[in-house]
Image: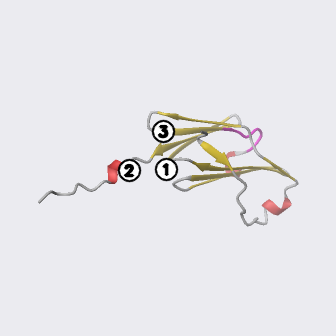
Amino acid sequence: MSLVDKKSIPIQKTDEESKVKYRITPNYSAWVAEKEFIIQVALPGVSKENIKIKALKDLITLRAERGDILYSLDLTLHFDIVPNETKTNYEEGLLQMSFQLYDPLKDAYLVPIE
């Protein structure tokens, strides 16, 4: 079983995206380490300001522009993450994202016995 499914998710194009000539799925690597889900994505020549990431509990989308190229990555996860606890690092064309894995027991309610 794979950690992620790469899917094409219909997203309304912005004015900037409609000028792109090439849409490319970037090379990426993904793994789970301890309580984190980590993804590394190759985005050669892209400036940090042109990277947009959206995360839900089981979905990650990435858009990055370089000239007339749009790097586009949509990942459906087979587990839940905590989207608002995301860490990113971008150096020399390599983006690393770390997502904390959701722990359902953290929010569990202790039921009293009467």
What element does badge 1 sit on?
loop
Q: Residues within 10 Å of mark 2 (few under 14, many from 20)?
A: few
Decide which of 77, 36 is in the foreground and name it: 77
Q: Which mark is residue 104?
A: 2
Magenta segment: 41-46
Report the amino acid beneath label 2: Pro
Along the line of sight, which residue is nearer the eye, 62 or 80?
Answer: 80
Split into 4 quadrants, where in the image is the C terminus?
bottom left
Q: Residues within 10 Å of mark 1 (few under 14, many from 20)?
A: some
Q: On the picture, is 15 further left or further right than 36? A: right
CB-based contact (under 8 Å), mark 3 and mark 1: no
**C-alpha span from label 2 to label 1:** 9 Å
Query: For this view, does 92 lie left or right of residue 80?
Result: right
> x, y (%) of residue 91?
65, 35
| Pointer 3 or 1: first along the chain | 3
Q: Secondary structure at mark 3?
A: strand
The secondary structure making up most of the magenta span is loop
- Image mark for residue 36: 3
Q: Could you tell me if the residues under marks 2 and 1 are in contact, i.e. CB atoms within 8 Å?
A: yes
> Residue 44's x, y, as percent?
76, 38
Which one is earlier in the sequence, the residue at label 3 or at label 2? 3
The residue lying at 79 percent from left, 66 percent from top is: 15
Q: CA distance from mark 3 to mark 2?
A: 14 Å
Instruction: Check disc 1 and report the residue beneath it.
Output: 80
Q: CA distance from mark 3 to mark 1?
A: 11 Å
